[in-house]
Amino acid sequence: MIIIIKINIKKEQIATILNIIDKKDKISKQDFESMLKEEKLNTNQIQSINRLIDNKVKPADYSYFNNLFLLLKSYGVEKYCEISPFTVRGLDYYTGVVFEAVEISGEKNSLSRSLFGGGRYDNLVSDFDEKLQIPGVGFATSDVILLEFMQNKGLLPSSVLKPVDCLITVFDKDSLSNSIETAVYLRNNNVSCELYPDSQTKLDKQLKYADKKKIPYVLIIGPAELKINKIKVKNMKTGEQKDLSKEELLRVLK
């Protein structure tokens, strides 16, 4: 951020320039420089940014990073850390260091995206109460990316990977509330279930989804089932279908 300011980039441009730098390792050098030129940066400014990115900053270069790596060493994790000049996402609102965690094992199934990222806020709490001057650090992760990472590493217990007891389909938007109520009923009775997230998806595709995830039972609650106050239960292994009440369904699934 200091270097960005030193090369006289306008304050209102900083967020945009940081966003472009953040994409540096995902696009070609030509596209990167074209994006900077579109923001009216001159040749000297672009060269300064390239020098920053191409020459990794070492901890000893700045007292801040030197002190940071001394602390990381105390925790015994400094070997997992390095300074990345193009990890700049969020510097327009974070007030200190920003960070990302990525997998660098080089294995065949290694992820190429960051597992999580975050940064330091010096004034986060004071935004809610001016009397409190408490700094904080926050980060966020993607449950999908984290799950894939843990699966690749064999870190998930088999009980977590076990499919749910049933998939509750959504016939259409008019019956969505009935599907939700069924999900709540089953969960309150300790039956694991998954509610299909899209009422626009055709039923056959929802069934294929359950088959792919090896979910043993599928529940269908359409107009015909609502008319007789029943739930159609399909056994995905045998293909057998039955219309059951909620109480009967509970006995089958348990």
Image (cartoon, rainbow, N blue to C red):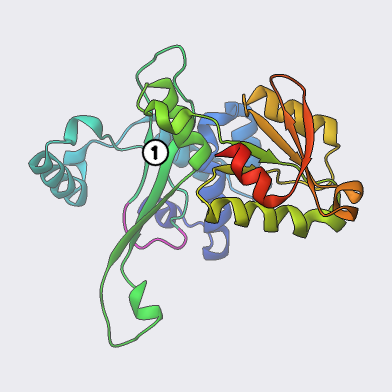
Find disc 1 in the rendering and name its residue: 52
Q: Is residue 93 magenta?
A: yes
Q: Secondary structure at mark 1?
A: helix
Q: Nearer the viewer, residue 81 or 28?
A: 81
Name the kind of residue labelled 1 in the image: Leu
Residue 248, percent from left and from top: 67, 45
Quadrant in which the N terminus is drawn: bottom left
Q: Is residue 227 left or right of residue 128?
A: right
The kind of secondary structure the magenta stretch mainly shows is loop
Badge count: 1
Q: Nearer the viewer, residue 15 or 35?
A: 15
Q: Is residue 103 left or right of residue 72?
A: right
Residue positioned most to the bottom: 131
Residue 5, percent from left and from top: 42, 57
Residue 67, percent from left and from top: 13, 49
Res. 16 visible in picture? yes
Res. 36 visible in picture? no
**Image: 133 above or below 51:** below
Residue 233, located in which quarter of the rendered image? top right
Q: Is residue 60 left or right of residue 8?
A: left
Q: Nearer the viewer, residue 208 or 164?
A: 164
The residue drawn where x is 57% and y is 27% is 29
Q: Give the residues in magenta.
A: 92-97
Mark 1 burial class by Cα count in 10 Å: few <14, some 14-19, many 20+:
some
**Image: 192 above or below 124:** above
The residue drawn where x is 80% and y is 30% is 205
Residue 124, located in which quarter of the rendered image? bottom left
Q: Is residue 11 magenta?
A: no
